C-alpha cells in the first residue's frame, strides 16, 4: 500500500501535494485489494509446468474452490468488525435502554438492505454475464447504468416511505417500550434512514464487481461501515451518547459508497453512467428480483420477529438477544456471502453453456 501511495506522490515535484485528493488516496489503498478471482469458467487451462498451478487448481472446480477460500477468509474478516462494533457498544452502554432503542431502530434498515442486496445480486449477475457474451461491452455497461439509476430511485422511495411511516412502525415493533424509549427509538430511526438510500450504490456495484470476478473488495466492503461506526462511537459517545452510534452508521454507509465507487474506477472498467431506462434486459432482472426479494424477506424475517418479541420483555432483552446471537449470525452471514459471490458467476456461466447447448441441439434435431 505504501508503494502505491508513493506512486501517487511521484512525478509531481512542484505541486504534487496539491494534487493528492481523497480519490487518489483511496485508489492507492484499494489497489492491493482489487484482485481477480480464479473462477473464470471460460478460461482454458494451460499446460502444467514447474511454476504453474496444480492441475486441480486449473480446473473449473479448482478455480471455484480457490475463489471460495479467498472469499471465506475476507468475508470472515469483514464480518468480524460487526462483532467489534457490538463489543464496543456493549462496553459503552451495556444491556440497557439506549442499546435496545438503537437495535430496534436499526432492525428495519438492516433487514431491508440485506434482503435487497442478496436478491439483486442473484438476479443481476447471470443477466450481466449473458449480456457481456451476447452483446458488446458498451451494452453491458449501459445495463449496469440503468440498474444503478433504477435501484437508487427505488431505494430512495423506500427511504421516504420509511421516514414517513416511522411514527407508526416504531410503536408496533417496540410495544413493550415506555413512551420516552419509543421517542428515542424513533429519533434514532430518523438518523439512520438515509443509510437505506446510500446502500443502493454498494448493492449495484458489488454485484457488478462480483460479475467481473473482482471478489476481494466486495468481500471486505461490509467491514467498512462497522469500523467507521466504532471510530465515531469512540470519539463522540461522551458528547452524543447512543446518537453517535446512529450517526456513525450513516457515515459508514457513505464511506462504503466512496470505497466501492473508487474500486470500480480503478478496476480498469468503464464506470457506468446512471440512466433511468427500463430496458428489456432490466425488466427480465425485475421478473427474477421480485420473487427472490419476497422469499428473502420472508425467510429472513425470523431475526426481526425475535427482536420484536424481545422488545416486549424486560429492559435490555433486545441487547442481550443481539449479544447472544452474534456468533451464529456471523457464521450464517459468511456462508451466505460465500455462496452468493464466488460461486454465482460459475453457475451463471454453466447455465449459459447449457442454454447454448440446448439451442444447438434443437437446430441439429430440426435439420434431421
Image (cartoon, grey):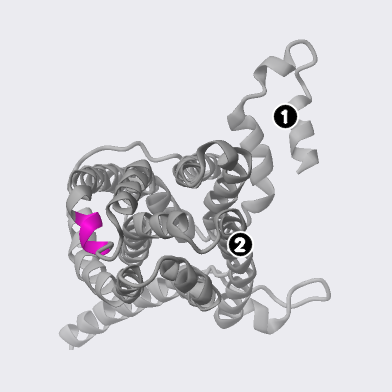
| Vertical relation: 24 (above or below) 298 | above
Residue found 38% across the figure and 48% down from its top: 199
| Vertical relation: 263 (above or below) 172 | above
Instruction: Decide: few, some or many residues near mark 1? Use Cα within 10 Å; few <14, some 14-19, many ≥20.
Output: some
Per the image, label 1 sits on a secondary structure element best described as helix
* Magenta-colored stretch includes residue 192: no
Q: Which residue is mark 2?
A: 87
> Quick one: quadrant of the N terminus?
top right
Looking at the image, tell me whether mark 1 or mark 2 is earlier in sequence order: 1
| Res. 79 image quadrant | bottom right
Q: Is residue 57 left or right of residue 89?
A: right
Q: Measure how far apart labels 1 and 2 are at the Cα level.
A: 37 Å
Name of the residue lying farthest toward the right: 50
Residue found 41% across the figure and 66% down from its top: 315
From which residue to which does the magenta span run? 169-173
Q: Which residue is mark 1?
A: 8
Of 132 and 276, which appears nearest the observer?
A: 276
Q: Main secondary structure of the magenta part?
A: helix
Q: Is residue 166 left or right of residue 309?
A: left
Per the image, label 2 sits on a secondary structure element best described as helix
| Vertical relation: 274 (above or below) 205 | above
Image x and y of residue 356, in percent: 31, 75
* Magenta-colored stretch includes residue 170: yes
Q: Is residue 320 left or right of residue 366?
A: right
Amino acid at each position: 500500500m505504501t508503494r502505491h501511495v508513493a506512486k501517487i506522490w511521484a512525478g509531481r515535484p512542484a505541486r504534487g501535494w496539491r494534487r493528492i485528493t481523497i480519490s487518489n488516496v483511496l485508489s492507492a489503498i484499494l489497489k492491493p485489494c482489487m484482485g481477480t478471482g480464479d473462477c473464470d469458467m471460460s478460461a482454458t487451462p494451460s499446460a502444467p509446468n514447474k511454476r504453474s498451478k496444480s492441475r486441480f487448481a486449473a480446473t473449473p472446480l479448482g478455480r471455484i474452490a480457490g475463489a471460495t477460500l479467498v472469499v471465506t477468509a475476507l468475508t470472515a474478516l469483514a464480518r468480524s468488525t460487526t462483532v467489534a462494533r457490538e463489543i464496543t457498544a456493549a462496553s459503552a452502554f451495556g444491556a440497557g435502554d439506549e442499546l435496545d432503542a438503537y437495535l430496534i431502530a436499526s432492525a428495519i434498515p438492516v433487514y431491508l438492505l440485506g434482503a435487497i442486496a442478496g436478491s439483486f445480486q442473484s438476479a443481476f449477475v447471470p443477466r450481466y454475464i449473458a449480456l457481456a457474451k451476447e452483446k458488446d461491452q458498451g451494452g453491458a455497461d449501459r445495463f449496469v447504468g440503468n440498474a444503478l439509476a433504477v435501484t437508487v430511485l427505488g431505494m430512495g422511495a423506500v427511504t421516504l416511505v420509511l421516514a414517513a411511516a416511522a411514527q407508526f412502525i416504531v410503536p408496533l415493533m417496540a410495544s413493550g417500550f415506555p413512551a420516552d424509549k419509543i421517542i428515542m427509538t424513533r429519533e434514532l430511526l430518523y438518523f439512520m434512514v438515509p443509510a437505506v438510500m446510500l446502500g443502493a450504490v454498494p448493492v449495484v456495484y458489488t454485484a457488478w464487481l462480483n460479475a467481473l470476478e473482482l471478489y476481494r473488495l466486495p468481500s471486505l466492503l461490509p467491514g467498512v461501515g462497522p469500523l467507521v461506526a466504532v471510530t465515531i462511537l469512540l470519539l463522540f459517545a461522551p458528547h452524543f451518547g447512543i446518537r453517535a452510534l446512529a450517526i456513525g452508521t450513516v457515515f459508514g454507509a457513505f464511506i462504503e459508497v466512496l470505497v466501492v465507487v473508487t474500486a470500480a474506477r480503478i478496476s480498469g472498467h468503464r464506470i457506468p453512467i446512471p440512466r433511468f431506462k427500463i430496458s428489456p434486459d432490466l425488466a427480465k432482472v425485475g421478473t427474477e428480483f421480485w420473487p427472490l426479494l419476497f422469499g428473502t424477506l420472508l425467510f429472513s424475517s425470523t431475526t426481526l420477529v425475535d427482536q420484536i418479541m424481545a422488545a416486549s420483555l424486560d429492559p435490555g432483552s433486545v441487547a442481550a438477544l443481539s449479544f447472544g446471537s452474534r456468533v451464529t449470525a456471523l457464521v450464517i452471514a459468511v456462508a451466505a456471502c460465500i455462496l452468493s459471490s464466488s460461486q454465482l458467476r460459475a453457475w451463471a456461466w454453466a447455465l449459459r453453456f447449457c442454454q447454448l447447448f440446448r439451442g444447438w441441439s434443437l437446430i441439429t434435431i430440426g435439420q434431421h
